[in-house]
Amino acid sequence: MTRRDAQSTRQRLLDAGLELLDERGIDLGLRNIPVTDVAERAGHTTGAVYQIWKRQRDFHRDLALHAVREDDWSDRGVIEAAVGEANDRASDLQNAFGVGADAYLSHLVDSRSFRNLAHFWAVARSDPALAEAIKAGYDASHAEFRSLFGSLLERFELVPRPPFSIDDITVSFVAVAEGFALRHAIDPERVAGPPGRDGDGDPQGWTLMTWVLEAALARMTKPAGAN
């Protein structure tokens, strides 16, 4: 097998593994993606796999890296679409963040890529290459969300309240969303939070996460021009 052929075969096998991972999920771990199934999906023999990887666990390690690197880290569109569709209700930043936050939480809860990432976080603690790939994905995601949150603050004439920065707001809000998504898998009723109260002017239907983010928003921002 020439080097070019080996690279092409390697890519096809990793792509086939990723397809199977998307179909079967990560719930049973990568052992649910045996190399025999991967080879069959890619149209190769099992021997072709072992010409590239000595052991199945070596293939699984590279499949984890491939999954993380191929993940779509830019989820800001989920929030933008939700706020855009609810534009008549998102007339202030509180409601804009509420609508967007709830949409993002629903997205994470149902996201196969988020479940994959949650599984690989633990593995990354002992795998520097995987940790680096996850960090690179987070850096790209952070840049996207930083731009989104910055534009929302500008739209509603708010600025970060010292000592906080737009980076602090971005990290905090995304970390809260991810934490609530993980908790939702175990305790969805508590994550739902208290109902709104029309008499007090509180929004109806917010999740507990939205209430937390609304409180953080009030503490971490102030009107532009205010002392």
Image (cartoon, helix red, strand yellow):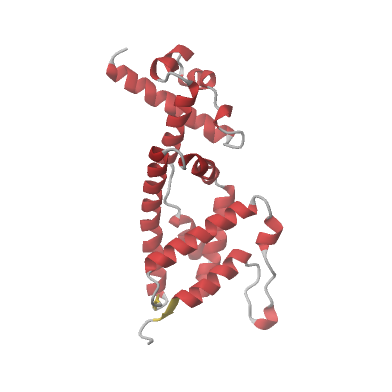
Q: Looking at the picture, how far across and down is residue 126, in whole percent?
A: 46, 39
- Residue positioned 50% across, 40% down in the render: 120
Q: Which of 118/204 is in front?
A: 118
- Residue positioned 48% across, 32% down in the render: 18
Q: Is residue 93 visible?
A: no
Residue projecting furthest to the bottom: 227
Left or right side of 209 for 130: left
Q: Is residue 15 visible?
A: yes
Q: Looking at the picture, how far across and down is residue 188, in whole percent?
A: 68, 55
- Residue positioned 57% across, 69% down in the render: 212
In this picture, is 10 found above or below 26? above
Residue projecting furthest to the front: 126
Residue projecting furthest to the left: 3
Quadrant in the rendering for residue 162: bottom left
Q: Which of 87/144 is in front?
A: 144
Q: Which of 198/165 is in front?
A: 165
Left or right side of 55 for 166: left
On the rendered image, what quadrant is the N terminus found in? top left
Q: Looking at the picture, how far across and down is residue 105, in whole percent?
A: 56, 57
- Residue positioned 58% across, 32% down in the render: 24
Quadrant in the rendering for residue 59: top left
On the rendered image, what quadrant is the C terminus found in? bottom left
Q: Which of 12/227 is in front?
A: 227
